[in-house]
Image (cartoon, rainbow, N blue to C red):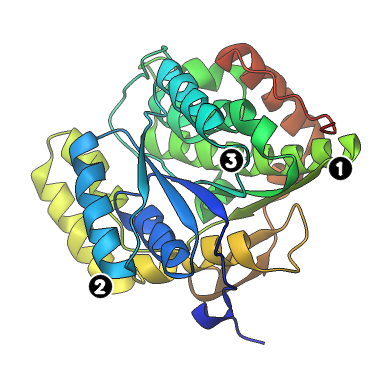
């Protein structure tokens, strides 16, 4: 049976946090959650863009989101944002770890980590870990990856602090997306082992037209390359709205099993969502455990999965 947007259930009374919701997949995901009745926190690092996105979301959905200042490339910002959520709410039904950067020139996060792994994985690891007290009573964590995770065969602790020498931006991007799947599956394993009621699932959008494709060239000051990416993306990619379908399916489909990974139906490239298989490397439980341990040490956050009393 083909999934449709109309299959999203009524989400009235449910609270969701979507990172990177000012544009692209995150914006489209937040929009549909709002349209279906959810209360939505929009996590974003740029206050002006966040305010603009919140205004247009309200206009389109008829319901205003709440803006949460959050910079995933700054672990202090992550701690502050998580603290605000913990102080303001007694539950969080849905966390969608969506925000990310794609193939920028070499940069480091505020804390000295390679930008892509530091933002796409480590920031979300820290955010999820700090929000766990609100997530252990039937909540769902959706971690958004990419089919690019299949292009690499491993990840090491040194990748988190990759120096500028030898830097390959697409390889680092793919490793960050591999880390997303490894984290999602390890969170599922640990939740089940602890006997806590938490659903950890993943999604990837296939090839969707978002600002990510041109953000890297723009950061590098390469306007020509940014233009070429924009034209190519418009020609062959599906829309950002369609790219958000796997995330929405992962976030709302009632019978989805924990540990599931969702992608587009047509060769995982485009189309309606279905459960797909991550790469063999992404399913390596030993590698996932090592990444978890490296992340605990790097982020200074040790997610405690214990049954709430």
Q: Which of 6 and 243 is in front in this view?
A: 6
Residue 76, image x, y percentages:
43, 15
Q: Which callout, 3 or 2, points at the residue further toward the start of the chain?
A: 3
Coordinates of residue 198 in the picture (x, y in percent):
75, 45
- Judged left or right of residue 47, residue 272 is right
Calculate the distance from the C-alpha at mark 3 to the C-alpha at mark 2.
Answer: 28 Å
Residue name at image x 45 percent, y 64 percent: 244
Element type at marker 2?
helix
Left or right: 190 in relation to 120: right
Q: Mark 3 points at which residue?
A: 180
Closer to viewer: mark 3 or mark 1 = 1
Query: In front here: 183 or 192?
Result: 192
Residue 102 visible in the shown view: no
Q: Residue at x 41, y 57 (%)?
A: 30
Residue 20 placement: quadrant: top left
Quadrant holding the N terminus: bottom right
- Classify mark 3: residues with Cα within 10 Å, few (<14), some (14-19) or many (20+): many
Residue 192 badge: 1
- Left or right: 173 with respect to 227? right
Q: Is 55 in front, or is 188?
A: 55
Residue at numbered disc 2: 235
Q: Compare residues 88 and 18 and report the one nearer the observer.
A: 88
Q: Residues within 10 Å of mark 1 (few under 14, many from 20)?
A: some
Mark 2 or mark 1: whose residue is earlier in sequence: 1
Q: Quadrant of the C terminus?
A: top right
Q: Which residue lies at the image location 75% right of the left edge and 44% below the top edge?
A: 137
* Quarter where residue 100 is shown: top left
Q: Is residue 210 shown to the viewer in this render? A: yes
Name above or below for residue 198 compared with residue 62: above
Q: Position of residue 238 (x, y in %)?
A: 36, 72
């Amino acid at each position: 049976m083909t999934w449709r947007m109309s299959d999203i259930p009524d989400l009235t009374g449910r609270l969701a946090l979507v990172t990177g919701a000012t544009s692209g997949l995150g914006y489209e995901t937040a929009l549909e959650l709002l349209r279906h009745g959810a209360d939505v926190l929009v996590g974003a690092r740029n206050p002006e863009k966040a305010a603009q996105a919140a205004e247009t979301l309200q206009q389109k959905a008829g319901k205003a989101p709440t803006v949460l200042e959050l910079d995933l490339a700054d672990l202090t910002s992550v701690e502050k944002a998580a603290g605000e959520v913990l102080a303001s709410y007694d539950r969080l039904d849905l966390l969608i770890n969506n925000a990310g950067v794609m193939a920028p020139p070499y940069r480091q996060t505020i804390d000295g980590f390679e930008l892509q792994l530091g933002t796409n994985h480590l920031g979300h690891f820290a955010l999820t870990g700090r929000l766990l007290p609100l997530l252990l009573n039937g909540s769902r964590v959706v971690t958004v990856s990419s089919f690019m995770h299949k292009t690499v065969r491993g990840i090491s602790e040194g990748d988190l602090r990759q120096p500028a020498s030898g830097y390959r931006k697409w390889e680092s991007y793919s490793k960050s997306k591999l880390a997303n799947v490894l984290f999602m599956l390890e969170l599922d394993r640990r939740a089940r082992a602890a006997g806590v009621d938490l659903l950890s699932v993943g999604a990837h959008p296939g090839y969707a037209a978002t600002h990510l494709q041109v953000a890297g060239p723009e950061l590098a000051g390469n306007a020509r390359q940014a233009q070429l990416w924009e034209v190519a993306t418009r020609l062959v990619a599906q829309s950002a709205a369609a790219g958000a379908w796997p995330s929405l399916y992962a976030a709302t489909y009632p019978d989805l099993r924990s540990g599931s990974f969702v992608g587009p139906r047509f060769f995982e490239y485009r189309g309606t969502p279905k459960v797909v298989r991550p790469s063999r490397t992404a399913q390596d439980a030993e590698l996932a455990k090592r990444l978890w341990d490296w992340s605990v040490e790097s982020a200074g956050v040790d997610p405690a999965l214990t049954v709430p009393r």
